[in-house]
Image (tube, coloured by chain):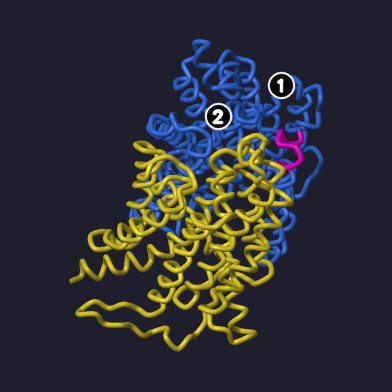
Chain colours: A blue, B yellow
């Protein structure tokens, strides 16, 4: 943790270009949001494809509060987080009793519903065209800066807090309960764990993180539209970073995003549609390679650390015993 | 009259939904894999028909056979190379493997064919049959006819042929099927091939009335999940019925809702079915 913190905090000292600082900032934004997916998706193996809901709520809430009422993003960020928790509670109440594939499908459908509604309520959200965040003046209170590195400094602190939280959750009682659910939900229930409440805690906490990531995304890019914050692609991205890095360790999303976000940026740098296509082909191939060869992500290659999040061989099917 | 017209439109489009979803549900029934790439198989089928039209001047209704064949081969290869490896792996692999395939196919298409919308011109494009006051657009009717024919063929194949029985046997109990001499690996490969092929065929037959572009699959993906879940994941007959129900629902909703919201009801039904009856309207999920 100390080494990671040192690296993140000293990055600006390496005289990186503005562009590189911007990429590093975007990486940080996605780390925060991706950790939000991991708490339930990775630690408890409740795989959602709807985390874009939380990311989008965070991005839209702070942006609309700022552009309509000039309210500081520091207030908007918590308004977004609070709204995300409310929505998470509602969604959780509906979908937590679904397992496996059905849970993934239900979250996907809910994310699509949110996206359709966001496009439809155009007077509020700007519809498919999105909302631009007006640049008022350089100020920490308004979270608007002239330099890429200023954004980086703010996001870096948030990333560290997020990672500390992720690590804390993993080592807390909540973390043990989540892992018990991952290993065997029925057994966890029999052991006296309140499965519903445990999932809800992880989902709500994750919603806060993903919403915060969404707010930072909006501040850094200055623009929010349904495609960039509410699409299936976003949900997949947030899960993808965690899975590639390792969804069961606190540093998985950091590692995954640190590899994939700059990779994506480097390949789309030239800007043409074909280049963007090729960049995402590589994304897709990496995802395929990871889930086929090493489902625990890059973390799975670290034997000692992997042992902490003990792997289980897939349970043999009852019908296969003969 | 608008009501009858809406129902007719819904049935015509619902036939296509049924066609795509039959492949999805067949794959789930046999190997418990939710194929998130099914919409992208449809997209590839559309491109196959598009290039067959541009290069060979082949009508999409004939190119449907090519679309099926091409996607059958691709699906079988994907099963052998990738799906087979995660069948007994962790759930995260099962879900995200096909998500990865979807991302790859979509963006490979973007890199190869560009982001532009493409379409074909066929003589029957704008023609329609009039039955009373109801208009039946010919391209939709032809696509529906293909769907119905394939649906019946699949039903007969699964119910009456030895290989179809083998597929159903694997869906019910893999171990017992193996003991009875069924080549389970071959069944899985062919099933995934057929599932992908059906999407490819569907892609070809909708080309006369739909634009093709790399991300068109996304428009169909949640709809086809709705259809498959409504009919009961794994239940092929259910998918046919589910397709028609979703098509009609979508079409009727345009009578009293803005068209931007036409999918809202469909997705709400989807979540509702998952809540109330996850096994679908026709009950237990199995290939039937």
Mark 2 or 1, nearer chain start: 2
Horizontal and vertical percent for residue A210? 53, 36
Whether residue A66 can be seen here? no
Where is residue A267, by image quadrant?
A: bottom right
x and y, in percent, of residue A181 in the image: 56, 22
Q: At 55% from the left edge and 29% from the top edge, which residue is drawn?
A: A40
Chain assignment, label 1: A
Query: Residue B50 falls in which quadrant of the image?
Result: bottom right
Q: Which quarter shows the C terminus of chain A? A: top right
Q: Which region shows up in magenta? A: A290-298
Q: Which mark is residue A310?
A: 1
Q: From this viewpoint, which residue is outermost toward the left?
A: B1
The residue under the point 44% across, 76% down is B209
Q: Which mark is residue A40?
A: 2
Q: Is residue A83 above or below residue B281?
A: above
Q: Secondary structure at mark 1?
A: loop
Q: Residues within 10 Å of mark 2 (few under 14, many from 20)?
A: many
Across and down, in percent, residue B64 comes to: 55, 73
């Amino acid at each position: 943790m100390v080494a990671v913190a040192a690296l993140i905090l000293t990055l600006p000292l390496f005289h990186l270009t503005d562009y590189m600082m911007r990429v590093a900032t975007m990486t940080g934004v996605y780390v925060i949001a991706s950790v939000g997916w991991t708490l339930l998706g990775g630690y408890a193996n409740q795989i959602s494809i709807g985390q874009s809901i939380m990311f989008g709520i965070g991005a839209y809430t702070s942006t609309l509060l700022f552009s309509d009422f000039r309210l500081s993003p520091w207030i908007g960020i918590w308004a977004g987080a609070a709204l995300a928790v409310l929505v998470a509670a509602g969604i959780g109440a509906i979908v937590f009793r679904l397992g496996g594939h059905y849970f993934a499908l239900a979250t996907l459908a809910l994310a699509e519903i949110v996206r359709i509604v966001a496009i439809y309520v155009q007077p509020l959200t700007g519809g498919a065209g999105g909302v631009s965040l007006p640049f008022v003046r350089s100020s920490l209170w308004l979270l608007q800066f002239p330099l890429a590195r200023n954004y980086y400094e703010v996001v870096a602190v948030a990333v560290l807090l997020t990672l500390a939280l992720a690590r804390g959750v993993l080592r807390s009682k909540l973390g043990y309960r989540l892992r018990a659910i991952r290993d065997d939900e029925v057994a966890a229930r029999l052991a006296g764990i309140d499965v519903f409440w445990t999932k809800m805690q992880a989902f709500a906490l994750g919603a806060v993180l993903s919403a915060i990531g969404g707010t930072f995304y909006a501040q850094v890019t200055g623009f929010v539209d349904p495609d960039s914050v509410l699409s299936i692609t976003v949900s997949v991205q947030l899960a993808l970073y965690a899975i590639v890095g390792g969804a069961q360790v606190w540093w998985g999303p950091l590692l995954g995003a640190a590899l994939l976000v700059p990779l994506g940026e480097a390949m789309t740098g030239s800007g043409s549609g074909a280049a963007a296509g090729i960049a995402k082909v590589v994304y897709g191939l990496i995802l395929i390679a990871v889930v086929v060869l090493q489902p625990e992500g890059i973390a799975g290659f670290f034997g000692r650390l992997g042992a902490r999040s003990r792997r289980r061989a897939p349970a043999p099917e009852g019908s296969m015993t003969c | 009259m608008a009501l009858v017209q809406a129902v007719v439109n819904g049935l015509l489009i619902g036939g296509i939904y049924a066609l795509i979803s039959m492949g999805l549900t067949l794959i789930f029934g046999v190997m418990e894999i939710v194929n998130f790439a099914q919409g992208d198989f449809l997209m590839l089928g559309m491109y196959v028909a598009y290039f067959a039209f541009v290069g060979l001047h082949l009508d999409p209704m004939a190119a449907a056979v090519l679309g099926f064949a091409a996607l059958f081969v691709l699906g079988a290869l994907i099963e052998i190379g990738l799906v087979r490896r995660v069948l007994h792996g962790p759930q995260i692999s099962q879900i995200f493997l096909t998500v990865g395939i979807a991302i790859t196919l979509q963006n490979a298409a973007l890199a190869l064919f560009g982001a532009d919308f493409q379409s074909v011109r066929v003589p029957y494009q704008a023609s329609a049959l009039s039955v009373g006051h109801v208009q039946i657009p010919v391209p939709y009717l032809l696509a529906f006819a293909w769907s119905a024919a394939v649906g019946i063929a699949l039903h007969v194949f699964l119910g009456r042929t030895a290989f179809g029985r083998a597929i159903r046997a694997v869906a019910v109990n893999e171990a017992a099927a193996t003991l009875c001499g069924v080549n389970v690996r071959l069944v899985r490969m062919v099933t995934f091939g057929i599932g992908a092929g059906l999407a490819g065929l569907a892609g070809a037959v909708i080309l006369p009335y739909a634009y093709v572009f790399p991300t068109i699959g996304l428009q169909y993906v949640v709809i086809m999940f709705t259809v498959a879940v409504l009919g009961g994941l794994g239940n092929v007959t259910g998918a046919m019925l589910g397709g028609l129900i979703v098509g009609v629902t979508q079409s009727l909703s345009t009578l009293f809702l803005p068209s931007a919201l036409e999918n809202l009801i469909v997705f709400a039904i989807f979540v509702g079915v998952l809540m109330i009856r996850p096994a679908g309207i026709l009950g237990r999920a199995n290939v039937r």
